[in-house]
Amino acid sequence: MPDNPTKTQGAQTPVADTPTEPAVTADLAAEHGLNAAEYDRVLATLGRTPTLTELGLYSVMWSEHCSYKSSRRHLKKLPTSGPQVIQGPGENAGVVDIGNGQAAIFKMESHNHPSFIEPYQGAATGVGGILRDVFTMGARPVALLNALSFGAPDHAKTQHLVSGVVAGIGGYGNCVGVPTVGGETRFHSRYNGNILVNAMAVGLADADKIFYSAAAGVGNPVVYVGAKTGRDGIHGATMASAEFSEDSAEKRPTVQVGDPFTEKLLIEACLELMATDAIVAIQDMGAAGLTSSSAEMAGKGGVGIRLDLDRVPTREDAMTAYEMMLSESQERMLMVLKPGREDQARAIFEKWELDFAVIGALTDTGRMTLVNGGRTVADVPLDSLTDDAPNYDRPHVPSEPRPLLRPDEVPAADDMGQAILDMVGAPDLASRRWIWEQYDHTVMGDTIARPGGDAAIVRVHGTNKGLALTADCTPRYCEADPFEGGKQAVAETWRNLSAVGAEPLAVTDCLNFGNPERPEIMGQFVGCIEGMAQACEALGYPVVSGNVSLYNETEGQAILPTPTLGGVGLIRNLDHRASPGIKRAGDAVFLLGE
Amino acid sequence: MKARVHITLKPGVLDPEGKAIGRGLAALGYDGVGEVRQGKVVELDLADTEPQAARDRVDAMCRDLLANTVIERYEIELI
Amino acid sequence: MKARVHITLKPGVLDPEGKAIGRGLAALGYDGVGEVRQGKVVELDLADTEPQAARDRVDAMCRDLLANTVIERYEIELI
Amino acid sequence: MKSAVIVFPGSNCDRDMMVALEAATGRPPVAVWHRETSLPADLDLVALPGGFSYGDYLRSGAIAGRSPVMADVKARAERGLRVLGVCNGFQVLCEAGLLPGALMRNTGIHFVCRDVHLRVDNARTAFTNAYGQGQVIRGHVAHHDGNYFCDDDTLTALEDQGRVAFRYCAADGAVTPDANPNGSRNNIAGVLNAAGNVLGMMPHPERLIAPELGGTDGRGVFDSLVAALADA
Ligand SMILES: Nc1ncnc2c1ncn2[C@@H]1O[C@H](COP(=O)(O)OP(=O)(O)O)[C@@H](O)[C@H]1O
């Protein structure tokens, strides 16, 4: 950078990025998802009208998706610590100790709205995003899972959505070469207009080689790597935070296209660089791309950041600062390097044919300063984007208790044989082989229990240890009684892990609910979390990472409350594992539990 | 009657396949090749005999199944 | 100059994707659709200015990389 | 036995292949980056692993088949070096012209990952001598483009010259359409070049090398190579 970028400079009032940039008004802010009170807060923070670029930053960072403004205070109720926890929520993924100096790193995330609009690419980029969360932390991804909720099988859109989503998940995971070993799939009319696509990734790393996202070291270079930035998915984060309406597809046409090939190269290049000690901090550019990655890294590190947007590798001409900051182009990462390590890093990324650019530096200002074409186009306090983002205590009412269903109220089947056939043929119970056969579940040569059992088992490469993995939830329980349903979902993952002989370690979650501004939906959310918290507490089974997806509604119809839980367990000796098949005629059958 | 539908990614939508082909050509020594974009063609045999009706029907097929207008655009050619 | 290369499966080579599209259209109620074939189009931006030279070069690219003549045939269009 | 595994951008079974080769030969193979212009000297085997080289963009194996290292693979194969291509490696060998035919989209149009039965149709090769002629073994496929196609003359030549190494079959060895996971002509799962030193196969032998992975029937391919090279 030409001038000395790291020193505090006299407060500069940012200017418009382009001569045609619209003036920022309360209406424009509302179109960006900021309500009147929130916009007032922006004005008060800055003491002036924001530029369009700044409005973009606030709209993204204060969206439900990034700020967790409706959920933050409730998520605090979940237990997140334990002797096995190396890193709980707050980083790109959770990290647990699995002994012998090794760690398992995992997280689950939703890609619901994009998958409804463009099922193949929406689901594919969901897998890409969750993989980045895991390898960002230094882990080699070793397994993928996916939890899918579709509308009724006979609904006009279901078939198209199912085939697109399954193909997209397979298309991405198969190509990057990470086995997809499990998941769950359900069908219910309450998902007709709003499907759920939750993807989970699990990785392995040495416990002393975990990478974090807090930026440090004033003056250190901020580096962009991966694919170029295009005009993809601008407003994706705000879309993930708004209810659907019939014309969403028209209004928000921007869905990103994933490139799993580039992701595979990015994994290899990042792991190669991580084997050196050049990286200070690293974060992937997920929803809200450059904005959230740079703000969160600098915010966590308590430093400032200055980016020179002219240096951002772009795919298209004449991209504005606003577009670059809001782009959701996939397969990109942001890193802070130790000074002088740029050339070493560049050589690795160039070998893998990826873009590499030094786009800025850390400062001591506590502000995010964006420069484009020599003009300062944004200059805002970082705290206002991150820690001081809105945090709401939304009103919530408990769900009406449902009457208990007593066995004698359920008519007995006339013909047991037929009842069994009906059940195994029911969409929710039928075999999922047709799904998992479309996923490469054996690549990497360590899949010990393939899909089809209670939990999948993936061996820790080169050892006789294994990770057991499962994803579960029963939404109708959560609707009938959120508290009990939340507990049950946790317990189900626990049972599935135990059933293969694993010691459950920790869970990740993906909390899919309707509009939190409706007290009854908020009541479901709070109930499920409190139930989950109680179960996790009782089991010593902490939540180490997760994701919240709200506003899953179409035309006022909310989905079933769906807190998907992803459980990870450890099998210390793979010779002592269990599988569901009945082994021999004559074996005794036991029923355990109540 | 036959229809040929060209389906291409909208301008600005990432085309990883086109990019890879471009790199492949460069690696083989073909220089001076700028942007490469890849698309699909679908050829349909139609029972229709009236061009306008055929075109309308193919247009409906494109919107219903053949193209996803969120990321793709299409062009119909009757032959 | 721009070139557009149409790559289609040779006649007689089974096209499962075309078939699947045909079935999809039928399932949506589009009747009277006969055979459906799917192919690729590759669009190239070329530095060339002379049409014949451009065509020859693109033809070489097709034989070298763009088409697999065991199963595909191609057609070049300059635009 | 000295072996090498070629790594293309997008290869993802390179590690699996190295694990299997090391287990069979007792020596870790050398990884060769696709941009190298020559293979290491005194190699006994070069393996092209599975994966999605160049994302399978354009056609599976097309871009990798023309990468710099392939010229030397071709030259050395002509002088008798053993070459094994698995899955994407098979696709690359066809695209590079080391094997006849092409691998097209599965007729079911979906990616398919499952165990299959394979019949060893020629057990007199460097890649198959550990199996019995006609033996039915377990195989494991994981591919989207495994539908082997070639013209009639080529097919006749392959059949007449015993160049079909493996065929998809039912548990009893019957070669039936139902046992064919991808629509390959004559249920072909693996073919040899005319000289018999190049094998391409869609099933992944490296994924079935231990009981805990689901079986050991894949080991035969590696054990055969070790035996053939010991005899040589
Ligand atoms: N979308 C999916 N992807 C991969 N595997 C799946 C998917 N859906 C279900 N499965 C697998 O199918 C099996 C049965 O699923 P499910 O009926 O949800 O199991 P359970 O209720 O016993 O936990 C499990 O092994 C699960 O991992």
Image (cartoon, coloured by chain):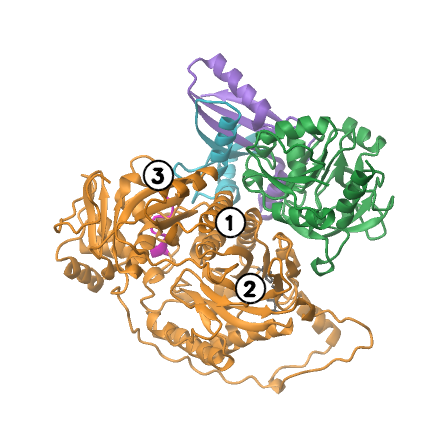
Chain colours: A orange, B cyan, C purple, D green
Q: Is residue A74 visible?
A: yes
Position of residue A556 in the picture relative to residue C29 (left or right): left
Residue C75 placement, left or right of A314: right
Disc with the residue nearer the chain's start (1 vs 2): 1
Is there one chain holding both mark 1 and mark 3?
yes
* Separation of residues labelled 2 and 3 (CA atoms): 41 Å
Q: Determine whether label 1 and label 3 are within 8 Å by CB.
A: no
Kindly identify which residue carries mark 3.
Answer: A314
Q: Quadrant of residue A323?
A: top left
Are labels 2 and 3 on one chain?
yes
Residue B18 highlighted magenta (yes or no): no
Subunit bearing disc 3: A
Category of crowding for the residue at label 1, using alpha-carbon neighbours closer than 10 angstroms: few (below 14), some (14–19), many (at least 20): many
For the stretch drawn in magenta, the main secondary structure is: loop
Determine the CA span between mark 1 and mark 3: 25 Å
Q: Position of residue D77 (x, y in %)?
A: 71, 29
Q: Is mark 3 within 8 Å of ligand 1?
A: no
Residues drawn in magenta: A228-239
* A80 vs A327: above or below: below
- Can you tell me which quadrant of the image ligand 1 is in? bottom right
Residue A33: image x %, image y %? 28, 58
Identify residue type, mark 3.
Answer: Thr
Q: Name the residue that disc number 1 marks.
A: A120
Please tell me whether mark 3 sits on a helix, a strand or a loop. loop
Residue drawn at point x = 78 percent, y = 38 percent: D229
Horizontal side of A458 relative to A229 (left or right) equals: right
Q: Which mark is residue A168?
A: none
- Residue kind at label 1, given as amino acid type: Tyr
First of labels 2, 3 by sequence position: 2
